[in-house]
Image: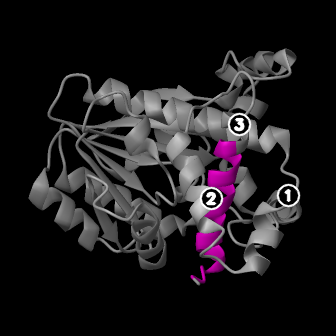
Amino acid sequence: MSQLSAVSETALLTLKSRIIESEKEPPLLIDPRGKEILAKLQERIPAETWERLLNRKFSPTLTSYIALRARKYDAYANEFLRDGNGLVVSLGCGFDTRFWRIATKDPNYMEVDLPEVIKLKQELLGTDPGYQMIACSVLDHRWISDTAAIQNDKVLFLAEGLFMYLPEKEVKALFRKLATTFHNSQLVFETVHRKYTRGLRKKMVELKMKRNAGTSAGSAYTYGLRRAEDMEQYADNLKVSEEWSYFEEPDLKPKFMQYLKHVKAFSRTQWTIKASIA
């Protein structure tokens, strides 16, 4: 029986959300490998964890957001790999199954997450999954050296629902390290507006997330940006090339929510930034 820390438990929530949306008609995401992993997990995690986190009603807004985000990040990976010779690195991967959702056959792929998550994921997958997994915190820069030893150009770093929960100082240091180690590469990551990382707004988000998630882990934002371009100050060779909001998705329901993409108070509350590393 595997015991996950509170932080690692959040990976179960994103997995279950993807499966919920993949079983709807029409599905927002097709994820058969994720369904297989979820079924195996029930035998390997404590019954209390399963009951508290997974055997509960999930918010449709939450599940659709996570599925649409995963689909968008799949698209980023497919676009990046289209020209060949690229390496995709998924940071804080959890129980993600993007490797099997990418259109490219046998993509050049790597995952980084905490040792307890990687160990359990390897047990669930059984035989060699076909890509490398690095078991360490993303804030431990050893994984950067390991990755650069394999490839230090044309690398795509993906980080869904990760950096906003990490200390600001360490996130900035990580960005600088990536910028000085790699070139001709890209960084795609989710962030939140800085105003939600402090004061009353932070406390309100924390209470809401604890109530909706069934766990206190990942309930407080600690890193955010006022605007995407602020990250360009971390290193001279970092440049924002694209921004994406959940509200831009044509499959978003109810449909009226799509109009919120024009309202920055909504579209830049929690959004994704794509940046180049020259």
Q: In the rendered image, is residue 222 in sight? A: no
Say which of marks 3 and 1 sits in front. Answer: 3
User: How many numbered dots are placed on residues in this image?
Assistant: 3
Q: Is residue 261 above or below residue 88?
A: above
**Would you say the residues marked 3 and 1 are in contact, meaning their CB atoms lie under 8 Å apart?**
no
According to the image, label 2 marks what residue? 39
Q: Dot 2 surroundings within 10 Å: few (below 14), some, or many (20 or more)? A: few
According to the image, label 3 marks what residue? 21
Of the residues shown, which amino acid type is indicated by label 2?
Ala
Which image quadrant is residue 153 in?
A: top left
Give me the residue at 83% from left, 50% from top. 58
Return the x and y of residue 271 as percentages of the image width and height: 62, 38
Q: Main secondary structure of the magenta part?
A: helix
Camera-nearest residue between 16 and 184: 16
Quadrant location of the N terminus in the rendered image: bottom right
The kind of secondary structure element at disc 3 is: helix
Q: In the rendered image, is residue 93 in sight? A: yes
Q: Earlier in the sequence, mark 3 or mark 2?
A: 3
Return the x and y of residue 131 as percentages of the image width and height: 26, 54
Which image quadrant is residue 21 in?
A: top right
According to the image, label 1 marks what residue? 212
Return the x and y of residue 202 as percentages of the image width and height: 79, 61
* First to last magenta residue range: 2-19
Camera-nearest residue between 63 and 100: 100
Q: Earlier in the sequence, mark 3 or mark 1?
A: 3
Return the x and y of residue 184 as percentages of the image width and height: 19, 36
Kindly report the distance in space between the C-alpha atoms of the residues bearing marks 3 and 2.
16 Å
Is residue 4 located in the magenta-colored stretch of the structure? yes
Of the residues shown, which amino acid type is indicated by label 1?
Asn
Left or right of 85? Residue 78 is right
**Would you say the residues marked 3 and 2 are in contact, meaning their CB atoms lie under 8 Å apart?**
no
